Image (spheres, rainbow, N blue to C red):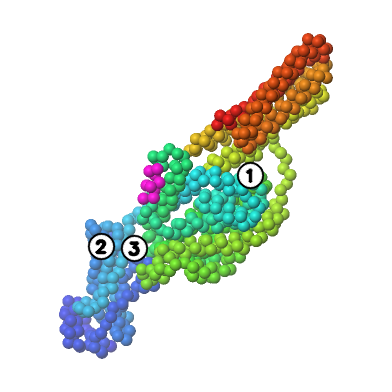
């Protein structure tokens, strides 16, 4: 290697040009033929160097000069020039615009960023060599508050995203609530039908967690049996992946348009059903807008080595699953978490291999939501939560050993689009679709594994968590569930069940009240008084629940149904008052009075009591079935009932006229008892009158 004496740079460049043009060796023994190549961290990763505005970037821009044989060439000058910078930026410069290669053929410099955030391009080329290649480097300047902006953007975007999912779910539940209830009403014990129903319900409510919580509420409210839920739970897991598939379409550019299209009918239309659909459309647009905001906020993470290193750690399956469980438990939505994974993968921050353990963890994390929902509820409700947890846990234990095969399968079935950069094998759209497909395939495989064994799973859960004979607590609602208020149709269904329970208690009170008058025994008085306390309790709880339903934005027909139910509650509460206050007090007096009814009078009271009970039973059926034909029949039956009362009253006065001794002594009590029964029948018939008015 030839050695040179020190020559000032200005003269050295002039000599270099002469030597190059005359073919004389410069720094090597052969004729000059050199190439410039990259020699920086950017060759090893896709991370773009960044720094704060007005500050120097710590990562140098390095190049290397080699000859035709690939050997490094020393002593060559390399020029570094700023090609472009953000508009209105000032103060940007490279520390050394001309740098000579060292003995390893390397030369480099540092960039001082300008005053404006954005991208800066720096070019490097061999000085005075007209056919030299040019290498362009990119660096990003960020505001001093960029970390705060990143956190704010991510949290704000996540808020839009989660709120959009809630809007979409609420809108669909309200608009499809009646159909949802009809689907559940027609459930059979066929596991495959239940599986399809689970998919359908979850597509309608847009959340597998919401479906599971709904099942917990249905079982707790006695609308369903635990065994009916097993197939639905498996279907819910598959149905929940539909949202992820929609998210993977990445139509963020149209997010605001979708929100606008939903907002206009929501503001202009008065029909609650159309408003609910519009609300769901706004939620759909909000999901993509939130994803766009999160995606923009997280762009700086692409050049954070620490963040990239953390994501690479998550390729460890067990750490990935743990992270997925914890994060899903925090945000209470596996779909939302998968949406975040889609964003990370789209920016090439997350590989499919690292994403699948997170997806398994997210699926497992949804069981926490079901467990929380079942706390404090019936044992059958806890069985639903346990079944969901067992499915998810067993599935995770099985599938964690097949992650490489799952990766291969997802890559095969996903459409492939080449990325714009040679550094990446797949485009952002492909990465997004792969994450969504992985989520769908995983849950579908788990469903296929367990679907043939739903009956065995149900038996296992019953053994692990058997239903015990629970002591009936008088002052407790059996059916009302605050979780169902989001779906007014469902809430009205459980309110109807609670009212039917109230009617049954009233019927038993009326049935028992005859005993003190006929047999002169007081043992039924205590139970009647206890039932009156229960009826008053139910009246308050049911009315409060119905008021909560009425305060929501619901259709006028549902509002009418709410007030009809409140009217029904009031009618039967008044029946309870007639029995517990009026008749009970009269019965206590009668037991100790020493009088008795005449044989004919006793027979009349028993017959009229029987007719009263029949009217109560008929009212129960009219309310349960909401049958207008039955309501009309009941009104005609009440006319016969009222005519019977008039006849019995006449017959009693006739006995008084004939001076029958027992009739004289019991006259007042006799008339009060049959009048009370007549009033009970009138209140019961009001249920039919309410229905016919509707």
Which residue is drawn at the image coordinates 51% and 43% (left, top)?
174
Q: Residues within 10 Å of mark 2 (few under 14, many from 20)?
A: many
Tell me the tag on residue 85.
Answer: 2
Assign a secondary structure to mark 3: strand
How far apart, in angstroms, are the residues tagged by discs 3 and 1?
59 Å
Disc 1 on helix, strand or loop?
loop
Query: Which of these two is toward me, 234 or 67?
Result: 234
Q: Which span is picked out in magenta?
A: 257-265
Confirm whether the magenta stretch covers residue 381.
no
Question: Which residue bears the numbered disc 3?
Answer: 50
Could you say where residue 678 lies in the image, as x and y percent from the top left?
69, 22
Mark 1 neighbour class, 10 Å CA radius: few under 14, some 14 to 19, many 20 or more = some
Q: Nearer the viewer, mark 3 or mark 2?
A: 2
The answer to whether the residue labelled 1 contacts the one labelled 2, judged by CB atoms less than 8 Å apart, is no
- Asked whether 243 or 13 is in front, the reply is 243
Residue 636 x, y percent position in the rendering: 65, 27
In the picture provided, is 415 more to the left or to the right than 207? left
Q: Which residue is mark 1?
A: 223
């Amino acid at each position: 290697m030839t050695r040179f004496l020190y020559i000032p740079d200005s003269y050295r460049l002039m000599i270099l040009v002469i030597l190059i043009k005359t073919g004389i060796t410069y720094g090597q023994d052969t004729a000059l033929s050199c190439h410039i190549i990259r020699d920086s961290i950017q060759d090893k990763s896709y991370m773009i160097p960044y720094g704060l505005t007005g500050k120097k970037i710590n990562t140098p821009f390095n190049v290397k000069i080699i000859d035709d044989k690939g050997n490094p060439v020393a002593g060559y000058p390399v020029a570094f020039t700023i090609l472009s910078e953000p508009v209105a930026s000032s103060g940007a410069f490279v520390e050394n615009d001309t740098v000579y290669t060292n003995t390893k053929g390397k030369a480099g410099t540092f960039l001082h960023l300008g005053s404006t955030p954005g991208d800066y391009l720096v070019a490097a080329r061999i000085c005075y060599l007209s056919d030299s290649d040019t290498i362009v480097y990119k660096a990003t300047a960020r505001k001093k508050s960029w970390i705060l902006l990143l956190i704010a953007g991510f949290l704000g975007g996540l808020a839009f995203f989660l709120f959009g999912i809630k809007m979409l779910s609420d809108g669909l539940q309200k608009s499809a609530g009646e159909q949802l209830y009809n689907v559940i009403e027609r459930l059979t014990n066929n596991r495959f039908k239940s599986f399809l129903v689970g998919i359908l319900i979850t597509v309608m409510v847009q959340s597998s967690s919401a479906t599971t919580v709904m099942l917990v509420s249905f079982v707790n409210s006695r609308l369903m049996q635990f065994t009916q839920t097993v197939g639905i739970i498996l279907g819910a897991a598959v149905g929940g992946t539909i949202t992820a598939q929609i998210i993977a379409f990445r139509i963020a550019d149209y997010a605001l348009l979708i929100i606008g299209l939903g907002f206009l009918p929501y503001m202009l239309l008065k029909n609650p059903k159309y408003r609910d659909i519009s609300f769901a459309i706004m939620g759909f647009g909000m999901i993509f807008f939130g994803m766009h905001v999160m995606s923009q906020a997280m762009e700086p993470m692409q050049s954070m080595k620490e963040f990239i290193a953390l994501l690479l750690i998550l390729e460890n399956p067990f750490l990935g699953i743990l992270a997925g469980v914890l994060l899903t438990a925090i945000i209470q939505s596996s779909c939302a978490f998968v949406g975040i994974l889609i964003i990370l993968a789209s920016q090439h921050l997350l590989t499919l291999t690292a994403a699948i353990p997170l997806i398994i963890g997210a699926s497992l994390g949804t069981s926490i939501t079901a467990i929380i929902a079942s706390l404090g509820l019936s044992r059958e409700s806890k069985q639903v939560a346990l079944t969901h947890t067992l499915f998810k846990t067993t599935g995770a234990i099985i599938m964690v050993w097949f992650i490489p095969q799952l990766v291969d399968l997802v890559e095969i079935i996903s459409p492939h689009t080449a990325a714009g950069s040679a550094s990446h094998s797949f485009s952002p759209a492909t990465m997004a679709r792969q994450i969504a497909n992985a989520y769908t395939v995983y849950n579908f495989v788990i469903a296929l594994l367990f679907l043939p064994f739903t009956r065995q799973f149900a038996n296992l859960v019953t053994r692990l968590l058997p239903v015990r004979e629970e002591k009936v607590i008088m002052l407790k609602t059996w059916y009302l569930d605050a979780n169902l208020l989001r779906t007014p149709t469902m809430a009205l269904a459980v309110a109807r069940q609670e009212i039917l329970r109230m009617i049954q208690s009233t019927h038993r009170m009326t049935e028992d009240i005859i005993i003190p008058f006929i047999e002169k025994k007081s043992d039924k008085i205590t139970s009647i008084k206890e039932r009156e306390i229960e009826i008053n309790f139910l009246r308050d709880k049911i009315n409060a629940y119905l008021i909560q339903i009425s305060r929501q934005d619901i259709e006028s027909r549902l509002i009418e149904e709410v007030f009809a139910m409140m009217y029904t509650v009031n009618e039967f509460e008044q029946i309870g008052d007639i029995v517990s206050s009026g008749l009970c007090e009269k019965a206590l007096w009668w037991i100790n009075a020493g009088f008795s009814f005449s044989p004919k009078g006793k027979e009349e009271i028993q017959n009229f009591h029987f007719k009263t009970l029949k009217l109560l039973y008929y009212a129960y059926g009219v309310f349960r079935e909401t049958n207008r034909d039955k309501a009309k029949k009941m009104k005609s039956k009440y006319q016969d009932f009222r005519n019977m009362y008039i006849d019995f009253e006449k017959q009693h006065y006739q006995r008084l006229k004939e001076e029958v001794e027992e009739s004289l002594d019991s006259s007042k009590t006799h008339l009060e008892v049959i009048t009370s029964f007549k009033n009970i029948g009138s209140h019961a018939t009001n249920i039919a009158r309410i229905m016919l008015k509707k």
